[in-house]
Image: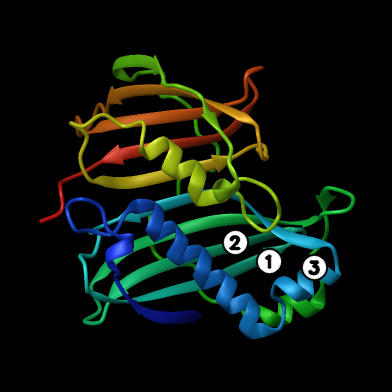
Amino acid sequence: MYFFTSRIRYSEIDRNGHLKVEALLNYFQDCSTFQSEDSGCGMRYLSKKHQAWVLNSWQIEIRRLPALGERVRIGTIPYDLRGYFGYRNFFMDTEEGEQLAVANSLWTLIDMKETKPVRVGEEQKKAYPLGEKMQMEYLPRKIRLPEDASGLQRREADPIVVREYHLDTNGHVNNAQYVHMALTRRTEEEGHIQRLRVEYKEQAHLGDEIYPEIYEWKQEDTQATAQTTFLRAEDGRCYCICEMIDGEKNA
Protein backbone atom coordinates (compact mmCIF):
# COMPACT_ATOMS: atom_id res chain seq x y z
CA MET A 1 0.00 0.00 0.00
CA TYR A 2 1.09 3.55 -0.74
CA PHE A 3 -0.53 6.71 0.65
CA PHE A 4 -0.09 10.44 1.16
CA THR A 5 -1.97 13.01 3.25
CA SER A 6 -3.56 16.25 2.16
CA ARG A 7 -6.10 18.92 3.06
CA ILE A 8 -9.10 19.86 0.94
CA ARG A 9 -8.39 23.17 -0.78
CA TYR A 10 -10.75 25.93 -1.85
CA SER A 11 -9.75 25.35 -5.49
CA GLU A 12 -11.01 21.75 -5.23
CA ILE A 13 -14.53 22.33 -3.90
CA ASP A 14 -17.91 22.84 -5.55
CA ARG A 15 -20.43 25.58 -4.81
CA ASN A 16 -21.66 23.60 -1.78
CA GLY A 17 -18.20 23.51 -0.23
CA HIS A 18 -17.44 19.83 -0.86
CA LEU A 19 -14.72 18.18 -2.92
CA LYS A 20 -15.58 17.98 -6.62
CA VAL A 21 -15.86 14.47 -8.03
CA GLU A 22 -13.24 15.18 -10.69
CA ALA A 23 -10.93 16.45 -7.93
CA LEU A 24 -11.36 13.08 -6.18
CA LEU A 25 -10.20 11.39 -9.40
CA ASN A 26 -7.22 13.71 -9.54
CA TYR A 27 -6.27 12.75 -5.99
CA PHE A 28 -6.40 9.06 -6.92
CA GLN A 29 -4.38 9.58 -10.11
CA ASP A 30 -1.83 11.69 -8.24
CA CYS A 31 -1.48 8.94 -5.65
CA SER A 32 -0.54 6.29 -8.21
CA THR A 33 1.76 8.81 -9.94
CA PHE A 34 3.52 9.58 -6.64
CA GLN A 35 4.00 5.86 -6.01
CA SER A 36 5.55 5.47 -9.46
CA GLU A 37 7.85 8.45 -8.93
CA ASP A 38 8.95 7.28 -5.48
CA SER A 39 9.60 3.74 -6.72
CA GLY A 40 11.85 4.88 -9.57
CA CYS A 41 9.37 3.92 -12.30
CA GLY A 42 7.86 7.34 -12.87
CA MET A 43 7.50 9.60 -15.89
CA ARG A 44 11.21 9.82 -16.78
CA TYR A 45 11.61 6.04 -16.52
CA LEU A 46 8.57 5.41 -18.71
CA SER A 47 9.55 8.13 -21.19
CA LYS A 48 12.96 6.51 -21.77
CA LYS A 49 11.22 3.21 -22.49
CA HIS A 50 8.55 4.93 -24.63
CA GLN A 51 5.87 3.48 -22.37
CA ALA A 52 2.83 4.77 -20.53
CA TRP A 53 0.19 3.36 -18.21
CA VAL A 54 -3.20 3.99 -19.85
CA LEU A 55 -6.36 3.85 -17.76
CA ASN A 56 -9.06 1.48 -19.02
CA SER A 57 -11.77 1.89 -16.39
CA TRP A 58 -12.84 3.27 -13.03
CA GLN A 59 -15.40 2.14 -10.50
CA ILE A 60 -15.65 4.61 -7.63
CA GLU A 61 -17.96 4.22 -4.61
CA ILE A 62 -18.47 7.53 -2.80
CA ARG A 63 -19.67 7.47 0.81
CA ARG A 64 -19.13 11.16 1.45
CA LEU A 65 -17.29 14.00 -0.27
CA PRO A 66 -15.09 15.86 2.23
CA ALA A 67 -15.59 19.56 2.94
CA LEU A 68 -13.20 22.49 2.69
CA GLY A 69 -10.30 22.18 5.11
CA GLU A 70 -10.77 18.52 6.01
CA ARG A 71 -7.57 16.54 6.32
CA VAL A 72 -7.57 13.32 4.33
CA ARG A 73 -5.41 10.31 3.55
CA ILE A 74 -5.32 9.08 -0.05
CA GLY A 75 -4.01 5.59 -0.77
CA THR A 76 -3.58 3.01 -3.50
CA ILE A 77 -3.11 -0.75 -3.44
CA PRO A 78 -1.87 -2.51 -6.60
CA TYR A 79 -3.35 -5.98 -6.21
CA ASP A 80 -2.55 -7.73 -9.50
CA LEU A 81 -0.07 -7.35 -12.37
CA ARG A 82 -0.86 -9.79 -15.14
CA GLY A 83 0.47 -9.69 -18.70
CA TYR A 84 0.16 -6.04 -19.72
CA PHE A 85 -2.61 -5.24 -17.21
CA GLY A 86 -2.36 -3.58 -13.81
CA TYR A 87 -5.18 -3.66 -11.25
CA ARG A 88 -5.36 -1.02 -8.50
CA ASN A 89 -7.62 -0.12 -5.62
CA PHE A 90 -7.76 3.42 -4.27
CA PHE A 91 -9.23 4.95 -1.13
CA MET A 92 -9.73 8.29 0.58
CA ASP A 93 -10.17 8.36 4.37
CA THR A 94 -10.40 11.08 7.00
CA GLU A 95 -7.73 11.50 9.68
CA GLU A 96 -10.08 9.68 12.06
CA GLY A 97 -10.37 6.69 9.73
CA GLU A 98 -13.79 7.37 8.19
CA GLN A 99 -13.87 5.85 4.71
CA LEU A 100 -14.94 8.54 2.26
CA ALA A 101 -14.45 6.74 -1.06
CA VAL A 102 -13.05 3.50 -2.48
CA ALA A 103 -12.27 2.64 -6.08
CA ASN A 104 -11.19 -0.09 -8.43
CA SER A 105 -9.27 0.57 -11.64
CA LEU A 106 -7.76 -1.29 -14.59
CA TRP A 107 -4.66 -0.04 -16.42
CA THR A 108 -2.76 -1.18 -19.53
CA LEU A 109 0.96 -0.69 -20.12
CA ILE A 110 1.35 0.70 -23.66
CA ASP A 111 4.35 0.96 -25.98
CA MET A 112 3.81 4.52 -27.20
CA LYS A 113 5.95 4.06 -30.33
CA GLU A 114 4.13 0.95 -31.50
CA THR A 115 0.82 1.98 -29.88
CA LYS A 116 0.25 -1.53 -28.58
CA PRO A 117 0.23 -3.22 -25.17
CA VAL A 118 3.52 -4.44 -23.71
CA ARG A 119 4.06 -6.92 -20.88
CA VAL A 120 4.96 -5.56 -17.46
CA GLY A 121 8.67 -6.19 -16.82
CA GLU A 122 10.26 -7.46 -13.62
CA GLU A 123 11.56 -4.01 -12.69
CA GLN A 124 8.06 -2.57 -12.61
CA LYS A 125 6.67 -5.60 -10.81
CA LYS A 126 9.21 -5.03 -8.03
CA ALA A 127 8.25 -1.34 -7.91
CA TYR A 128 4.62 -2.15 -7.11
CA PRO A 129 4.37 -4.66 -4.22
CA LEU A 130 0.97 -6.33 -4.40
CA GLY A 131 -1.51 -6.03 -1.55
CA GLU A 132 -4.87 -7.56 -0.73
CA LYS A 133 -7.83 -6.60 -2.88
CA MET A 134 -10.10 -4.19 -0.99
CA GLN A 135 -13.59 -5.19 0.07
CA MET A 136 -16.14 -3.53 -2.20
CA GLU A 137 -18.72 -4.56 -4.78
CA TYR A 138 -16.86 -5.23 -8.03
CA LEU A 139 -18.92 -4.48 -11.14
CA PRO A 140 -18.13 -5.31 -14.79
CA ARG A 141 -15.69 -3.02 -16.56
CA LYS A 142 -17.93 -2.68 -19.62
CA ILE A 143 -20.78 -0.19 -19.26
CA ARG A 144 -24.13 -0.94 -20.86
CA LEU A 145 -27.51 0.77 -20.71
CA PRO A 146 -29.88 -1.37 -18.60
CA GLU A 147 -32.51 -3.13 -20.69
CA ASP A 148 -35.19 -2.69 -18.02
CA ALA A 149 -34.47 0.97 -17.21
CA SER A 150 -37.49 2.89 -15.92
CA GLY A 151 -38.34 6.12 -17.72
CA LEU A 152 -35.28 6.09 -19.97
CA GLN A 153 -34.78 9.50 -21.59
CA ARG A 154 -32.21 10.52 -24.18
CA ARG A 155 -30.82 13.95 -24.95
CA GLU A 156 -27.78 15.50 -26.61
CA ALA A 157 -25.57 18.37 -25.47
CA ASP A 158 -23.52 20.88 -27.42
CA PRO A 159 -20.19 19.57 -28.74
CA ILE A 160 -16.98 20.22 -26.81
CA VAL A 161 -13.79 21.22 -28.62
CA VAL A 162 -10.65 19.73 -27.05
CA ARG A 163 -8.37 22.54 -25.82
CA GLU A 164 -4.83 22.58 -24.42
CA TYR A 165 -6.10 22.52 -20.83
CA HIS A 166 -7.88 19.20 -21.47
CA LEU A 167 -4.60 17.42 -22.31
CA ASP A 168 -2.13 15.41 -20.24
CA THR A 169 1.59 14.78 -20.83
CA ASN A 170 0.78 12.07 -23.39
CA GLY A 171 -1.04 14.59 -25.59
CA HIS A 172 -4.44 12.99 -24.96
CA VAL A 173 -7.48 14.25 -23.07
CA ASN A 174 -6.83 13.66 -19.35
CA ASN A 175 -8.91 10.94 -17.68
CA ALA A 176 -10.53 13.34 -15.21
CA GLN A 177 -11.40 15.81 -17.99
CA TYR A 178 -13.75 13.28 -19.60
CA VAL A 179 -15.52 12.92 -16.26
CA HIS A 180 -15.73 16.71 -15.91
CA MET A 181 -17.37 16.88 -19.36
CA ALA A 182 -20.00 14.35 -18.27
CA LEU A 183 -20.55 15.97 -14.86
CA THR A 184 -21.18 19.41 -16.32
CA ARG A 185 -23.93 17.97 -18.54
CA ARG A 186 -26.00 16.84 -15.54
CA THR A 187 -29.30 18.51 -14.71
CA GLU A 188 -29.68 20.80 -11.69
CA GLU A 189 -32.05 18.41 -9.87
CA GLU A 190 -29.50 15.60 -9.72
CA GLY A 191 -27.82 15.09 -6.36
CA HIS A 192 -24.69 13.66 -4.80
CA ILE A 193 -23.05 10.93 -6.86
CA GLN A 194 -22.86 7.66 -4.95
CA ARG A 195 -21.28 5.56 -7.68
CA LEU A 196 -19.21 6.51 -10.72
CA ARG A 197 -18.13 4.08 -13.41
CA VAL A 198 -15.99 5.13 -16.36
CA GLU A 199 -14.93 3.12 -19.40
CA TYR A 200 -12.24 4.64 -21.62
CA LYS A 201 -12.43 3.43 -25.23
CA GLU A 202 -10.47 5.78 -27.52
CA GLN A 203 -8.19 8.78 -27.10
CA ALA A 204 -9.23 12.31 -28.05
CA HIS A 205 -6.61 14.87 -29.09
CA LEU A 206 -6.24 18.62 -29.45
CA GLY A 207 -8.89 20.09 -31.75
CA ASP A 208 -11.16 17.03 -31.72
CA GLU A 209 -14.88 17.64 -31.18
CA ILE A 210 -16.65 15.55 -28.54
CA TYR A 211 -20.41 15.06 -28.74
CA PRO A 212 -22.17 14.15 -25.44
CA GLU A 213 -25.07 11.70 -25.77
CA ILE A 214 -26.90 11.45 -22.44
CA TYR A 215 -29.32 8.84 -21.10
CA GLU A 216 -31.18 9.29 -17.80
CA TRP A 217 -33.36 6.81 -15.94
CA LYS A 218 -34.44 5.57 -12.50
CA GLN A 219 -32.92 2.47 -10.95
CA GLU A 220 -35.55 -0.24 -10.50
CA ASP A 221 -34.54 -1.28 -6.98
CA THR A 222 -33.79 2.09 -5.33
CA GLN A 223 -35.43 4.59 -7.71
CA ALA A 224 -32.17 6.52 -7.59
CA THR A 225 -31.48 8.82 -10.53
CA ALA A 226 -28.92 7.40 -12.94
CA GLN A 227 -27.18 8.88 -15.95
CA THR A 228 -24.97 7.36 -18.63
CA THR A 229 -23.09 9.78 -20.87
CA PHE A 230 -21.44 8.63 -24.09
CA LEU A 231 -18.73 11.04 -25.21
CA ARG A 232 -18.52 10.46 -28.96
CA ALA A 233 -16.67 11.61 -32.03
CA GLU A 234 -18.67 13.17 -34.86
CA ASP A 235 -18.62 9.84 -36.73
CA GLY A 236 -20.13 8.02 -33.73
CA ARG A 237 -16.97 6.44 -32.32
CA CYS A 238 -16.97 6.51 -28.55
CA TYR A 239 -14.12 8.06 -26.57
CA CYS A 240 -15.50 7.44 -23.11
CA ILE A 241 -18.62 6.27 -21.23
CA CYS A 242 -19.49 7.65 -17.78
CA GLU A 243 -22.21 6.14 -15.59
CA MET A 244 -23.31 8.09 -12.51
CA ILE A 245 -25.71 6.84 -9.82
CA ASP A 246 -27.06 9.40 -7.36
CA GLY A 247 -27.36 8.92 -3.61
CA GLU A 248 -28.16 11.17 -0.67
CA LYS A 249 -26.84 14.71 -0.69
CA ASN A 250 -23.83 15.65 1.47
CA ALA A 251 -24.67 17.11 4.85
**Front one among 76 and 222:** 76
Residue 219 percent coordinates (x, y): 27, 29
Residue 95 percent coordinates (x, y): 25, 82
Mark 1 vs mark 3: in front: 3
Residue 168 picture quarter: bottom right
User: In this picture, is 230 found above or below 67?
Assistant: above
* Left or right of residue 23: residue 170: right
Q: Which residue is mark 3?
A: 47
Q: Residue at x 41, y 30 (%)?
A: 228
Quarter occupied by the C terminus: bottom left
Q: Residue at x 52, y 63 (%)?
A: 29
The 10 Å Cα crowd at callout 2, few under 14, some 14 to 19, many 20 or more, is some
Q: Helix or strand or loop: what does disc 2 sit on?
A: strand
Q: Earlier in the sequence, mark 1 or mark 2?
A: 1
Are the residues at dot 3 and dot 2 in contact (C-beta closer than 8 Å)?
Answer: no
Q: Helix or strand or loop: what does disc 3 sit on?
A: helix
Can you name the residue that lies furthest to the right here?
A: 114
Can you tell which mark lies on residue 87? Answer: 2
Are the residues at dot 1 and dot 2 in contact (C-beta closer than 8 Å)?
Answer: yes
Residue 247 percent coordinates (x, y): 21, 44
Q: Helix or strand or loop: what does disc 1 sit on?
A: strand
Can you name the residue that lies furthest to the left here?
A: 251
Q: Which residue is mark 1?
A: 81
The Cα–Cα distance between marks 3 and 2, rounded to whole angstroms, is 21 Å
* Left or right of residue 240: residue 225: left
Q: Is residue 140 visible?
A: no
Q: Earlier in the sequence, mark 3 or mark 2?
A: 3
Q: Amino acid at mark 2?
A: Tyr
Q: Amino acid at mark 3?
A: Ser
The Cα–Cα distance between marks 1 and 2, rounded to whole angstroms, is 6 Å
Residue 3 picture quarter: bottom left
**Front one among 199 and 25:** 25
